[in-house]
Image (cartoon, helix red, strand yellow):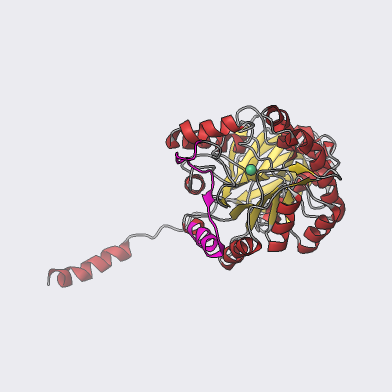
């Protein structure tokens, strides 16, 4: 009764309250000396990029403008604008594992919150270096903490790049550390172990339920050896049926599959199973490169880290690692000649985030025979294609997310200028400004 009596009055009150108009998205213009148009492969003079909210709405050129300080304008005189960079192979929850000992220390001794705290720092470093999007490929024993970090970044709780994650990678019994200790003790394993086609389907479903955007598998791991013609081979980790089951189950749930594959057998089985990216790809023969190009399977070559870990791993008695950089260079060149889509990936976390920049990969790619422009494309348009985000990322174009960086000089002449990023904007918000 009381409600009925109050209703007419309440309705009048509601009508009297003005409904606030939806706020127009915030507009900001960014002016710089140059823009690298990664698609056309051209440096263009005098860009003025208009950002509305978190997207680019206009890209214009006014080379002869005079500098003025206007409201809503970010001036970057003398600098070159590029799209935000994409690193398609990282490990924010790892802090360097050149040796087995370093890996074991993190898995066995570090408290879980401590690992997450260090990952928060790693995410911030990545963003500050201009990597506004990463595909983080395995937590190494930290379960689905990557999905939590991804969500916390998306909510704006902590600064970091936009993340695509895999939660726990998959491998089979006995193929992934921690191994080699006394057999009557149980040790944690850096991946989720699965065996048999049904068991592997179940493991894929579990990772998806925990928030995986991609599924990662270790196509091969231990027992690497040099072949007589100087490629690398190993035993297999999976049966054909197991790997096919993983790929089929992941694809049925619209999750692409990334395969760590460093040997002939690992790469061949992963390609035949129909994975979406080959990680590292240290041993790619011309014929398998042709098959990857035909099937449009990307490769993330991770060249710089291959050189970084070569010596410490060889010193540990794993002599094959001293040979890896040479074989990887040959494989990288085979992939380039065949037209395999190459996505930039660093394996950051395999080296300490606080000591080396992900951008070192650019000069490593150029040293191994790629042009600076192609190296930059691998971290922009090709990375966006690999992540199925080409409508949102990878170029400075109207409609794309407003992820921008700026450097001094022409990165198509000297790719090392990308090691010193002076301005970073992610989602329309400036996060680094050295000016
Ligand atoms: Zn990795």
Residues in magenta, as a range = 182-206
Q: Is residue 349 magenta?
A: no
Q: How many marks?
A: 0
Q: Nearer the viewer, residue 103 or 317?
A: 317
| Vertical comparison of 20 with 328: above or below | below
Task: Please provide percent x and percent y for residue 291.
Answer: 80, 61
Instruction: Say if residue 395 shows up in the picture.
Output: no
Looking at the rendered image, the quarter that the C terminus falls into is: top right
Is residue 224 visible in the rendered image? The answer is yes
Farthest left residue in view: 1
Compared across the picture, whether 293 is left or right of 353 comes to: right
State the image quarter where residue 254 is shown.
bottom right
Q: Percent from the top left, x then y, of residue 145? A: 48, 45
Q: Quadrant of ligand 1?
A: top right
Q: Is 34 positioned to the left or the right of 10 in the image?
A: right
Question: Horizontal and vertical percent for residue 42?
Answer: 84, 47
Position of 381 relative to 96 (above/below): below
The residue located at (58%, 68%) in the rendering is 252
Q: Is residue 151 left or right of residue 318?
A: left
Front residue (pair 32, 328): 328
Give the residue displayed 63% in from the left and 27% down from the top. 355
Quadrant of the rendering where the N terminus is positioned: bottom left
Q: Is residue 185 magenta?
A: yes
The x, y position of residue 188, in whole percent, is 48, 41
Question: Quarter of the image holding residue 329?
Answer: top right
Quick one: 394 or 141, which is closer to the camera?
141
Q: Residue at x 53, y 43 (%)?
A: 190
């Amino acid at each position: 009764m009381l409600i009925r009596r109050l209703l007419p009055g309440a309705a009048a009150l509601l009508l009297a309250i003005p409904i606030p108009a939806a706020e127009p998205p915030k507009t900001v213009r960014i002016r710089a000396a140059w823009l690298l148009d990664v698609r056309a492969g051209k440096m263009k003079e005098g860009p003025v990029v208009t950002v509305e909210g978190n997207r680019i709405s206009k890209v214009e050129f006014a080379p002869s403008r005079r500098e003025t300080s206007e409201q809503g304008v970010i001036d970057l005189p003398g600098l070159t604008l590029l799209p935000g960079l994409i690193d398609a192979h990282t490990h924010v929850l790892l802090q360097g594992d050149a040796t087995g000992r370093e890996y074991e220390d993190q898995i066995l001794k570090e408290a879980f919150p401590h690992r997450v705290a260090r990952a928060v720092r790693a995410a911030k470093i990545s963003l500050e270096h201009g990597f506004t999007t990463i595909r983080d490929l395995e937590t190494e024993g930290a379960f689905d903490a990557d999905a939590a970090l991804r969500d916390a970044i998306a909510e704006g709780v902590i600064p970091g790049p936009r993340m695509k994650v895999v939660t726990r990678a998959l491998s089979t019994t006995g193929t992934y550390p921690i191994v080699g200790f006394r057999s009557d003790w149980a040790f944690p394993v850096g991946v989720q172990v699965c065996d048999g086609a049904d068991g592997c389907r179940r493991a894929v479903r579990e990772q998806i339920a925990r928030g995986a955007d991609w599924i990662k598998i270790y196509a091969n791991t231990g027992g690497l050896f040099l072949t007589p013609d100087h490629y690398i081979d190993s035993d297999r980790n999976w049966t054909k049926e197991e790997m096919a089951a993983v790929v089929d189950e992941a694809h049925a749930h619209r999750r692409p599959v990334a395969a760590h594959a460093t040997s002939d057998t690992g790469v061949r089985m992963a390609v035949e199973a129909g994975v979406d990216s080959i990680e590292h790809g240290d041993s790619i023969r011309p014929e398998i490169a042709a098959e990857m190009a035909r099937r449009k399977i990307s490769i993330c070559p991770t060249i710089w880290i291959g050189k970084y870990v070569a010596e410490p791993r060889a010193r540990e008695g794993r002599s094959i690692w001293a040979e890896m950089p040479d074989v990887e260079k040959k494989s990288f060149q085979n992939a380039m000649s065949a037209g395999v889509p190459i996505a930039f990936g660093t394996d950051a976390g395999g080296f300490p985030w606080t000591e080396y920049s992900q951008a070192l990969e650019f000069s490593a790619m150029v040293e191994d025979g790629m042009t600076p422009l192609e190296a930059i494309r691998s971290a922009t348009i090709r990375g966006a294609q690999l992540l199925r985000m080409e409508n949102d990322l990878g170029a400075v174009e109207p409609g794309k997310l407003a992820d921008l960086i700026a450097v001094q000089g022409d990165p198509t002449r000297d790719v090392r200028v990308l090691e010193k990023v002076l301005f970073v904007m992610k989602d329309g918000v400036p996060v680094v400004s050295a000016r």
